[in-house]
Image (cartoon, rainbow, N blue to C red):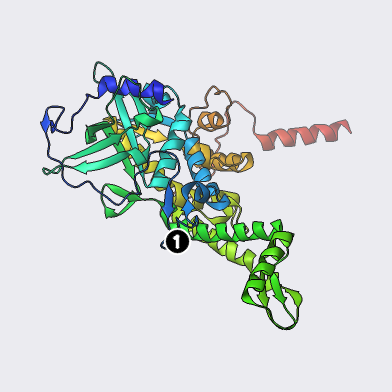
Amino acid sequence: MYRRRLPLLRLVLPRWNPSDMNLFGLQITTQKAATGQPTQGTGGWYRVSEPYAGAWQRNDEEKRGDVLTYPTLYACLRRVSEDIGKLPFGMTREAASGIEQPVDTLRVLNNPNGYQTAQQFREAWILSKLIHGNAYILKQRNNGGMISALYVMDPTRVLPLVSTSGEVFYQITYNSDANLLPESITDQQIRVPASEIIHDRMACFHHQLIGVPPVAAANWPTVKNLRILRNSAELFKNGAQMGGILSAPAGISEKDAKDLKEYWKSTTAKDVRVVGMDMKFTPFSMNSVDAQLVEQMEYSDRQICQPFGIPPFIVGIGNLPSGLKAEDMVNVYYRFALQSLIESMENLLMQGLRIRAPLAIKLDTGVLLRMDTERRATVYGGMIDAGIATINEARSEFNYPPLNGGDTVYRQQQDIPIDAPLAEAAPEPVVEPDPDEPDTEEAKKIFDESIVQVS
């Protein structure tokens, strides 16, 4: 993957010697780099923290690979990144009437680079931001200076720098030992101006160029539950049996106690303690109700969800709150977990790709907020009755072809303003007799007389 990508970058980015202090024709003097991000690594997993001094020597440190694969944390990362990843890029143009009309999307948004689809690109962007607090998107330009590709960089290899004049640069480090560069390229660091990097960051608590990821806030609840899982695994590895106390009837020497303990452990694989007095084995026992491990783990799982803004039931923790419908659940999840990430991506892409009004880049959230068929039919039926949408607009939402006359808004006419005066009842029209027609009463009299004469 990298062998295909990095030579392309070198065609765009000049080789830079730190002693030259000149980049793209700009004379720069760097000051202390913005710090606060995780310790720089050489790729792969690296340690998050030591629970106490000397934990690394005792092989008791927590590694990022272990932390990120804890089920609840993994579910939060996967849920958010995949949900945003499945929202396609789109572009709109605002007409004079204020209505946004869809237009053709930029090619670089549909095909960001040669090894990622647009969905994978969005997922990588969000994962980098959630795990590291920062997402660095490097622009590749063609010979005409136009942006032809976008790459999500490894955040552990990118370092923001601030010059004495306040300009921002980014130092990108490559490790030739990891075969990330061809043998002909010896440079291991390049620095690019901020105009060539789209930098998306989470909450900047310590420095405005350094974001703090939600993974940092979820670290200790995750570590606690990992240790519970490890202890449970060890317990069941020993046949779900705890250790115990091995006591001697009349006391034994310290050397004999150690030898007996080692022999017991080597044959039973259980931890024991040796005391004097009566020689007998008393196993340890633990009441699962008193330990409340399930409650402890569920409480920590909820704490893991908090920094991400994810309602716990989204990742399978607890039950759906009573009275909350599926549509309400999606709206809550979108508002607290996804909306800020989506709008940040849209705004940064518009700024980085120099998209100006009336054009706009949008992620189609309709894919996420789409309702069930019955609910959608009810909503669009009401919109048609209220004159908000036309019949053909509603039919297009259900993938039905348009109808003749379906682009007209129809409204019934029985509604009138409440303060309008009531119309007076119109008098019945007076029908004037036709002079050519015989008088009705006279004709009836003649008809009656004729009947009498016949009878």
- Who is closer to the viewer here, 391 or 308? 308
Asked if residue 411 can be seen in this view, the reply is no
In the image, residue 384 lies at what x, y percent? 52, 38
Q: Check disc 1 and report its element: helix, strand or loop.
A: loop
In the image, residue 405 lies at what x, y percent? 52, 24
In the image, residue 242 lies at what x, y percent? 70, 67
Q: Is residue 250 left or right of residue 128?
A: right
Quadrant where the C terminus sits is top right
Quadrant where the N terminus sits is top left
Q: Is residue 206 left or right of residue 292?
A: left
Residue holding disc 1: 51
- Who is closer to the viewer here, 191 or 359? 191
Q: Residue at x 29, y 48 (%)?
A: 210
The residue furthest top is 143
Q: Quadrant of residue 7?
A: top left
Asked if residue 203 can be seen in this view, the reply is yes
Q: Residue at x 26, y 47 (%)?
A: 209
